[in-house]
Amino acid sequence: MKLKVCGMKYTDNMEAVATLQPDYLGFIFWEPSSRFFKGKMGQIPTTIKKVGVFVDAPLDYIVNKINQYSLDAVQLHGKETIEFCKGLRNSSLGLKGKQPQIIKVFSIKDTFDFSVLKVYEKVCDFFLFDTKGKLPGGNGYTFNWSVLENYPSTKPYFLSGGIGLKDIDKVTTFLNTPASKYCIALDVNSSFETEPGLKDIKRLKQFKELVRTKQQVS
């Protein structure tokens, strides 16, 4: 199971998180967020994919950030349409590097209409399921994961939404159910912070080791 640590903000802290070798680091490019990133990205190994998180941002703004920070993936956390996602696939956008992967986010509480995913199948590389709340993300609590028992797609997805150390047993149980078949990564954020954007390295390390250990046991 891969790990994505989202909401990185401070250079020294992100470099410390990088020593834990997560698979993804997320950077939020949405100004209202308390984790809005606008600084220096620091030294991050190429083995870690850099994900830019956007909320209904203009296409040229996203392209600018992709080029500025050499982003490996773009996470769309708003109401981006299928046409918008197709636009990101356009080779004439002026991208300086490789085409970034597209992660489309959908928010869930107790129920979800999975039929809305169908049109995004061919233009997105991954889906991400987060908790529906007041903010686009970082609300700090989990949604009802049993909803994913009805997941109709084969598209790999990230599981997000308030996941923390307190949820280790819940995560382990979920990963042993058919609903997790296409879950490839856990996305963590606010539950591992001492303040918005500042991650607790010790707790993150503990979480990563516990997930790995419990998977091996199961």
Image (spheres, rainbow, N blue to C red):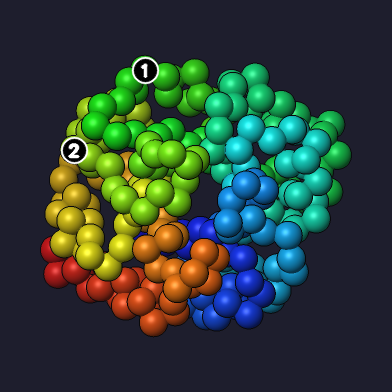
Task: Work out how far the residue at label 1 is from the one at label 2, CA to CA, in angstroms.
Answer: 17 Å
Taking the image as shown, residue 65 lies to the left or right of residue 79, namely right
Residue 14: x, y in percent?
A: 59, 73
Residue at numbered disc 2: 146
Q: Check if mark 1's residue and mark 2's residue have beta carbons within 8 Å.
A: no
Q: Which disc is residue 139 wearing?
A: none
Residue at numbered disc 1: 115
Report the front residue among 163 and 67: 163
Report the front residue among 55 and 93: 55
Name above or below for residue 217 compared with residue 121: below
> In the picture, residue 39 is in which quadrant?
bottom right
> In the picture, residue 133 is in which quadrant?
top left
Please name the residue shown 44% across and 69% down the image. Answer: 193
Identity of the amino acid at label 1? Ser
Taking the image as shown, residue 50 lies to the left or right of residue 164, namely right
Q: Earlier in the sequence, mark 1 or mark 2?
A: 1
Taking the image as shown, residue 211 lies to the left or right of residue 203, namely left
Please name the residue shown 58% across and 56% down the image. Answer: 34
One can see residue 59 in this view: yes
Please name the residue shown 22% across and 65% down the image. Answer: 166
Residue 27: x, y in percent?
A: 61, 57
How crowded is the residue under tag 2: few (<14 C-alpha within 10 Å), some, or many (20+)? some
Q: Quadrant of the N terminus?
A: bottom left
Residue 7: x, y in percent?
A: 54, 59
Identity of the amino acid at label 2? Ser
Report the front residue among 147 and 192: 192
Indicate the secondary structure of the residue bearing disc 2. helix
Residue 26: x, y in percent?
A: 56, 57
